[in-house]
Image: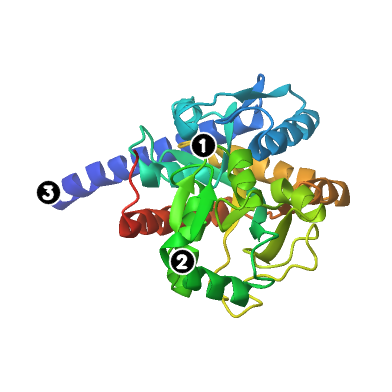
Amino acid sequence: MKHASLVIPRLLAAALASACCMGAYAQENGNAAKYPSRTVKIVVPYSPGTSADSIARRTAEHLSHRLGQSVYVENRPGASGIIGTAYAAGAAPDGHTLMVGPTTHVITPAFRPTPYDPVKSFTPIGQIAESAQVIITATGTPASNFQELVAYLKSKGDDAAYSSPGIASTAHLYTTVLQNMVGAKMRHIPAGGLNAAIMDVVQGSVTMMIAPIEAARPLIASGKLKAIAQTGSARSPLLPNVPTLAELGHPDYQLAVWVGLYAPAGTPTPIIARLNRELKAIFDTPEARTNLAESGFNVVLGSPEDLGRLTRTEFERWTKVIKTAGINPE
């Protein structure tokens, strides 16, 4: 009897726990079935006109039709994306506030303290696209390919310099990795903006830059810049004659700017699964692929788990690069 008196409470506790789990599961699926019950907001932590903003607006336009609810973009720029990202992280985890996050989603918190964790504060929905970058130099630089550029950089010694929009920008970090790879050391000249950084290359005040393809292409086409190599895993259709660094014997150097869609941590799994399906339906079309290709991006779609792994590994990568190179906020 004593044994039975111990077993019965345990069975009751197990049954109660199971009932609670089933109740939570039913509630989660019930909420997902009603989703969305109101307007959906996509937060962009940057100003209108950026690549992340353009992709977010395309997502919102098509998602609105597919969900049967109004979906709009809200730009919340400031502090290198921290303001908008912190706002999205603190939103209710019900699928009605989403966020488009580019590569800087993991770079900014690797560089400075933020009130959120890029991995733990968000539930990944899916990657949307990625864009290779291009190594550019002035037309007067005596180098017509990557090997010649590396030799030229080494010959210049302390006089070699590169530009970027600012400290811990992708241009800064990608060049930091490049320098370590080829054994060349250059001075970093932050220009305070993308266009200013590219013009520093055109004018010859710096030797090179790693720039977004869509930003540099007009000046390459007009002969004011030379395109030396691309940083992605495959050639961009915008620069079909420019080889990748992987083709040139550096297979480990495959760096691209990526864009993904996130929800606040704790958003129910059925809602995430629904949004992932809709994301694939929106961008896995010839029209979408052509549209993004014109702005230098390739459509890259996958599971929430794929974006989760990318977010985690990229955060670890850039945290290590920044720490090793001693890059600090000014």
Q: Is residue 72 left or right of residue 208?
A: right
Task: Tell me if residue 200 comes above or below residue 231 in the rendering.
Answer: above
Is tag 2's residue or tag 3's residue first in the polypeptide sequence? 3
Secondary structure under tag 3 reads helix
For the point 76% across and 35% down, the residue is: 58
Which residue bears the numbered disc 3?
2
Q: Which mark is residue 179?
A: 2
Judge by depth and name the residue closer to the eye, 290 or 14: 290
Task: Tell me if residue 215 comes above or below residue 78 in the rendering.
Answer: below
Is tag 3's residue or tag 1's residue first in the polypeptide sequence? 3
Q: Is residue 248 left or right of residue 109?
A: right
Q: What residue type is disc 2 on?
A: Gln
**Rounded to the nearest whole Å, what is the CA distance between mark 3 and mark 1?**
77 Å
Q: What residue type is disc 1 on?
A: Gly
For the point 78% across and 48% down, the residue is: 218
Rendered location of residue 37, percent (x, y): 65, 21
Rendered location of residue 97, percent (x, y): 57, 27
Q: Can residue 288 be seen at all in this image of the molecule?
A: yes
Which residue bears the numbered disc 1?
192
Residue 113: which quarter of the image? top left
